[in-house]
Image (tube, grey):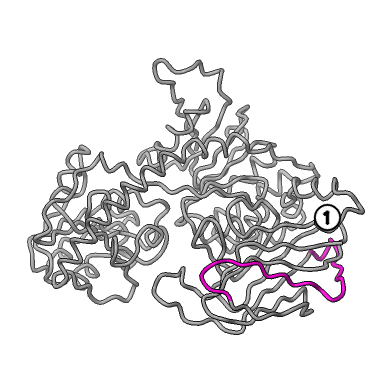
Amino acid sequence: MFSKKKITPVLGSKPRNTKPRLLFVDHVFHRKTRSFDFLVRIFEQGFDVETKYVDPSLPVDAAQLIDDSEYVVIGQMDFLTPLFIAAGKKVIVVQMYDGSAGLPDTHWQMNRQARYLNFSTTLHGRALSLGCDSMLVRYFTDPASVKPVTDMDTLRGFFWQRLPKSGINLPMVRRMMGDQLSHLHVHTPADDGSVFNEADLEGFDCPVTHSSWFEKQSDFAAVMDNANVFIAPRHAEGIGHAFLEAMARGMVVIAHDLPTHNEYIHNWTNGILFSQGVQSINLRDQMDKVRAISANARLTIERGHKAWVQSHPAMLEFIRTTPAAQMVKHAGLSANIDRIMAAYQQGRDPYEDALNRFSETRQLMASWRDFETEADQAPKNAPADQTDIHVFMGEGNSRPLTGSGWSVIEATHRWAVAQEADMTLPLTRDVAVTGVTLMARALEPCKLTVRLGDTVITSAPVELKETFARIHLPLAKPLRASASDGLKFTLSIDKVPAPHSHDPRSLSFAVKSLNVQTG
């Protein structure tokens, strides 16, 4: 089940024993694709790295997996997180939207003692809203490594039919592009085991070539060099190396409107997004716009790559400062974790059932010790401004906050996409709430109501535009909430005006931070 790859230091590097040991746990499929090698090279700058590959379809043997490494980075194998938390490791989880978006909230709540590197703004926001410590990292291909598109006089397509059963397939490409292409190259190996049918190549009004394997990277590059339109092969991506490389070339990327596609592409500006039911996309009659998309795509990657390289030291520091997990051992902990991991391998529903069934184990692992330590050390009779419970709806939140009804667009704040959103603060002792302060904004006037539990504690008109402003909502009478119940807030607004454009940043109401005053 496991195989090891010892990564040797480059000539002239420091001796291995000068760096802390880091175990990188990767999916066995990536031993072939080398998808995470770029991350390992970054980790090697600060750590002595060893990689172990795991086949998630097989039972987990903890004895083979856990070693004396101080740090453990889990690459897209989320279900292993509780195993390393229980072992007291410094745990960092690399999450991908295509592999982690379907996890239930209770998964994140159970694994708050890990830190998260998220390549998706959507996942980053979800981790923050569920009380986890997450860092948003955005990968960009080095544009100097690829040949830029120079000829946009005709449209020449490239499509890898990876998942024909998903609906993103050759019939869809034929319907969507019609007779606009002067040439199409199809790469045929399917991830889902589908057998390629050459009859699918018929019906195109242009020459069609196809490949089943590239012996050398240069062979693949030669095919890409001849194309200027890239049809992304999947509904969603974890990072999206292929479409990002296509953007770096200046190709017009046509991709399904889900992360991470829609976290890099602004529709009809630096690429094109489509929904599943799309019938056709007219490029040929808008060639000036197509040329602008091509230029903007490459510019996006050029600027983004600089930021990606500059983020490496912060990423290494985020890992280096990860605290070791602290677990209170109890009878049956190891066996329960084994059962939970086994349920994950059976699918989402069995996994969620197991998380609910082993609630004692989940709740024990869910404790966030830093929050508890701060509460325990707070002076018992301190002024209210010294005992505030701060909740930041954005980057840096490590509090045990859970919520629903929220989505993330920016790294620095949260956006409400519904008329109502809940959030819960688990507390370690009884507190009396005396007021709530929000930093909020509204693109149109609305009425904001705040409830604590089932009680409406205050409401106020919001007449803010464009910039965030402070809204202080004092309580006429202090309201006490017990630690066992937690502190549940509900924010609601009386209307949600339609967005001004397709850009989701134009949603009507946003909360940047929330501060609870206690006395």
The reply, left or right, for residue 42 in relation to residue 204 is right
Q: How many marks?
A: 1
Residue 436: x and y in percent read 74, 68
Residue sitting at x 26%, y 65%: 169
Bounds of the magenta segment: 464-486
Is 387 left or right of 97, judged from the image as shown?
A: right
Residues packed near mark 1 inside 10 Å, few (<14), some (14 to 19) or many (20 plus): some
The quarter of the picture where residue 416 lies is bottom right
Instruction: Give percent across and percent down for residue 269.
Output: 29, 64
Q: Dot 1: what SS? A: loop
Q: Please check the rendered image and state whether residue 294 is part of the magenta-colored stretch, yes or no.
A: no
Q: Is residue 318 left or right of residue 11?
A: right
Q: Nearer the viewer, residue 163 or 412?
A: 412
Q: Look at mark 1 in the image and give the residue it sits on.
A: 428
Image height of 445 relative to 403, above or below: below
Q: Nearer the viewer, residue 4 or 152?
A: 152
Q: Amino acid at mark 1?
A: Thr
